[in-house]
Amino acid sequence: MNIENAQEAVDDWIKEHGVRYFNELTNMAQLTEEVGEVARIIARRYGEQSEKESDKAKDLGEELADVMFVVLCLANQTGINLQEAFDKKLDIKTKRDKDRHKNNKKLQ
């Protein structure tokens, strides 16, 4: 599924199950909450914090998908074609950074 299809799938789901989109500020708060859940897993599972027993069953993929869902909602409700925006950003990064990381001694 490409990003454009994902945006359509989210829009269809909202129309069928969600009644309507939450407003943009509510979705921004939700995005922050979901990113926080991802950060908690990463900090405890891969960082230096110890993982609580209650966190061990948390699924990082599911939490990342929650982030993606809210980002797609925000794109839909603000009229952003995220596929186009992503493709453009990847092109910009490729032109700007094509040799930057290869030449970074810290990464070698």
Image (cartoon, rainbow, N blue to C red):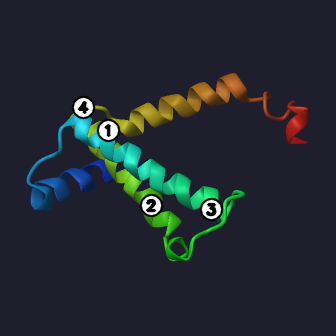
Q: Are marks 2 and 3 in contact (CB under 8 Å)?
A: no
Quadrant in which the N terminus is drawn: bottom left
Q: 10 Å neighbourhood of mark 1: few (<14), some, or many (≥20)? A: some
Q: Which residue is mark 3?
A: 44
Asked whether the viewer can see residue 2, the reply is: no
Residues at marks 2 and 3, CA–CA distance in whole angstroms: 14 Å
Determine the residue positioned at 17% across, 54% down: 14
* Residue furthest to the left: 19
Quadrant in which the C terminus is drawn: top right
First in residue order: circle 2 vs circle 4: 2
First in residue order: circle 1 vs circle 3: 1
Q: Which residue is mark 1?
A: 28
Q: Secondary structure at mark 2?
A: helix
Q: 10 Å neighbourhood of mark 2: few (<14), some, or many (≥20)? A: some
Q: Secondary structure at mark 1?
A: helix
Q: How many marks overall?
A: 4
